[in-house]
């Protein structure tokens, strides 16, 4: 076998190199300004990201986890209130709910979209339920209209976890603008990534925005005067300036992600690998390209032998992790979640993959598909 370099799951150095000149200029601008926290860059980014999403308001915060937590709190969710969400997500979704003292409740997912199944919400609603947090997992929009219909019938708030879905759409409308608020992460590997931690809440309500503004900085309504008890969750100027550079390329980056995903789809022809579903009316952000197969170990091994890294997102759903095991309501009735996590495998998918690397992954997938077809024929 030729000695080729291993294709990693992410390549942040290549991402930086692609925008190096503009990023360095942005960084210098901030360093020379003498203003490093919540200043002009954050305000400009908030305005630009709100406009990009089609939202009236954007509030930069310190992380995606904080964005979910502050959005929920700003919607009136208090300690002891229940929040319905999925177990098939990054643990951060659940950590955010518990961060404000609220109580997560797990609902199962739909096997096609892999997002929250709206038909299963109502049986979980109790008198303590205050909100729903759907997750647009892997960049696939959750069925927001159906979720909102159930939420409205019970008077629940909806905070969308958009950490994996910057730029994803349902019928031409960006995710994050369907519910009461949308929460984004700018962790470096996300579709819109900073060079450190960062996050944002978007919303259309000036009341929710005001609460987020107060909460992110000690509850201050004016400097040094706390209107409500708050915390420190600020986006810094350096990250905001870098995000402004990256935001200009988000649509092109997402388009390349979708293009690469299509070539992967076409390479997989066998019956043993299930490709991500195309859900009509939705524009997928392709944060992660996740296939399903009963032969996961075999596929993983085959890719490794061909110098291709793969991942598991996630190796365990939240309700089976030690910190959460057997203590979250709903966790005993998640058959779709429990069937899915053993079968998923994420392939490398990011805009900086070279055509040569894409071709190597395509070859490996086609090879595996053909072989497993022969086996099962
Ligand atoms: C990354 C992620 C988060 C958390 O974002 P951080 O910025 O790391 O706090 C929340 N939810 C989901 C689904 C994520 O993928």
Image (tube, rainbow, N blue to C red):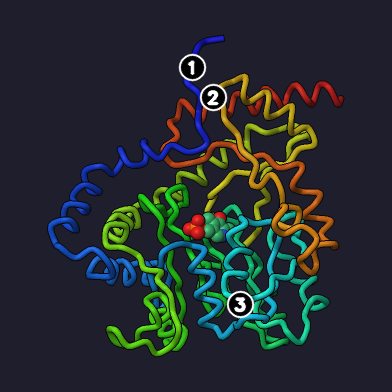
- 2 vs 3, front mark: 3
As displayed, is residue 298 above or below residue 189? above
Q: Is residue 323 above or below residue 288?
A: below
Separation of residues labelled 2 and 1 (CA atoms): 10 Å
Whether residue 356 is situated above or below residue 93 in the rendered picture: above
Q: Are marks 2 and 1 in contact (CB under 8 Å)?
A: yes
Q: Which residue is mark 2?
A: 360
Quarter in which the N terminus is drawn: top right
Q: Nearer the viewer, residue 275 or 206?
A: 206
Q: Are dots 3 and 1 in contact, CB under 8 Å?
A: no
Residue 79 visible: yes
SS class, disc 2: helix
Residue 262 position, x and y percent, is 57, 41
Q: CA distance from mark 2 to mark 3?
A: 42 Å
Q: Is residue 247 left or right of residue 345?
A: left
Look at 37% across and 87% down and name the residue there.
Answer: 226
Question: In the rendered image, which residue does mark 1 sit on?
Answer: 4
**What residue sits 75% from the left and 60% below the top?**
110
**Residue 283 appears anywhere in the view:** no
Circle 3 sits on which residue?
Answer: 158
Between circles 2 and 1, the one closer to the viewer is: 1
Q: CA distance from mark 3 to mark 1?
A: 47 Å
Where is residue 327? Give x, y as percent. 78, 64
Ligand 1 within 8 Å of disc 1? The answer is no
Judge the density around disc 1: few (<14), some (14-19), many (≥20) Cα neighbours within 10 Å: few
Helix or strand or loop: what does disc 3 sit on? strand
The quadrant of the rendering that contains the C terminus is top right
**Relative to 153, 350 lies left or right:** left
Residue 251 to residue 80: above or below = above
């Amino acid at each position: 076998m030729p000695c080729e370099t291993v294709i990693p799951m992410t390549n942040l150095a290549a991402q930086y190199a692609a925008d190096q000149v503009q990023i360095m200029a942005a960084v210098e601008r901030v360093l020379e300004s003498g203003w490093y926290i919540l200043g002009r860059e954050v305000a400009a980014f908030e305005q630009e990201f709100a406009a990009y999403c089609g939202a009236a308001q954007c509030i930069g915060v310190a992380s995606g986890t904080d964005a979910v937590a502050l959005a929920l709190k700003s919607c009136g969710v208090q300690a002891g209130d229940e929040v319905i969400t999925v177990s098939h997500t990054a643990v951060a979704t659940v950590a955010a709910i518990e961060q404000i003292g609220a109580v997560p409740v797990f609902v199962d997912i739909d096997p096609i979209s892999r997002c929250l199944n709206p038909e299963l919400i109502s049986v979980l609603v109790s008198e303590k339920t205050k909100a729903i947090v759907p997750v647009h997992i892997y960049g696939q929009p959750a069925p927001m209209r159906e979720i909102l219909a159930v939420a409205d019938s019970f008077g629940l708030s909806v905070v969308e976890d958009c950490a994996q879905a910057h730029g994803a759409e349902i019928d031409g409308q960006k995710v994050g603008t369907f519910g009461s608020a949308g929460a984004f992460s700018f962790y470096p590997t996300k579709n819109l990534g900073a060079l450190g931690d960062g996050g944002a809440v978007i919303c259309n309500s000036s009341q929710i925005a005001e609460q987020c503004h107060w909460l992110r900085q000690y509850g201050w309504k004016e400097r040094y005067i706390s209107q409500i008890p708050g915390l420190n969750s600020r986006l810094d100027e350096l990250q905001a300036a870098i995000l402004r550079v990256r935001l200009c390329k988000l649509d092109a980056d997402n388009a390349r992600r979708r293009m690469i995903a299509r070539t992967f789809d076409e390479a997989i022809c066998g019956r043993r690998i299930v490709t991500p579903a195309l859900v009509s009316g939705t524009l997928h952000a392709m944060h992660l390209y996740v296939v399903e197969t009963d032969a996961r170990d075999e596929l993983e091994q085959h890719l490794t032998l061909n110098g291709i890294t793969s991942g598991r997102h996630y190796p365990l759903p939240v309700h089976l992790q030690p910190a959460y095991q057997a203590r979250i309501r709903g966790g005993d009735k998640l058959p779709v979640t429990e069937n899915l996590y053993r079968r998923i495998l994420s392939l490398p998918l990011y805009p900086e993959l070279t055509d040569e690397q894409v071709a190597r992954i395509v070859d490996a997938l086609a090879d595996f598909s053909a072989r497993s077809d022969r086996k099962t024929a």
